[in-house]
Amino acid sequence: MVNMRILGIDPGLRSTGFGVIDWHDGMLRYVASGCIKSGDGELPLRLKRIFSGLTEIIHQFQPVQAAVEKVFVNINPQSTLSLGQARGAAVCAAVMCDLAVAEYTALQVKQAVVGSGHADKIQVQAMVMRLLGLSAAPTADASDALACAVCHAHATQGVAANVWLGRRVRHGRIV
């Protein structure tokens, strides 16, 4: 079994969700979650708040891997670009703290947590609560970040664990 602390990140320019879980002997355990609010103002300062906030969280909770939700393309190109920049700040914070970073689409995260890639936010929140034994639902952004961390924990089982840990699999063998 793979034992590790995972930081899940749901990037957003206004609110970046984070969730920290422990994956130990096939069991999930909630550690912390919340949101980094970037506030108003110039884009560079908002990106700095995301970067600094995640760096502080990484130093506080000492995860060994990070899982980040991939950006999807939506109707408004400006929104997509802004989201991509927030995601870039989040990925840079993780990489600068020497974390391995895995990326998942929203479809992959929902599939791993709920069992359906088309689940809504309420279903994701309910399953995150159930999987982590929480008595109350985290905010939507924190719940999405925890779901991303849970998705990564499940992806690290079996042969996939060796890929995430820097090993390669070739023809069914670890090399």
Image: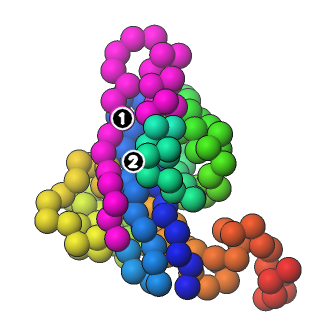
Type of the residue with mark 1 = Ile
| Residue denoted by label 1 | 36
Is the Cβ of the residue at disc 1 closer than 8 Å to that at disc 2? Answer: yes
Image point (39%, 38%), residue name: 16
Q: Is residue 63 above or below residue 160?
A: above
Q: Is residue 163 above or below residue 104?
A: below
Res 111 visible? no
Image quarter where the N terminus lies is bottom right
Image point (32%, 65%), residue name: 30
Instruction: Return the x and y of residue 55 as percentages of the image width and height.
Output: 51, 38
Q: Is residue 47 above or below residue 155?
A: above
Element type where label 2 sits in the image: strand
| Residue denoted by label 2 | 18
Q: How is the image coloured?
A: rainbow
State yes or no: residue 108 in magenta: no
Provide the residue span drawn in magenta: 29-53
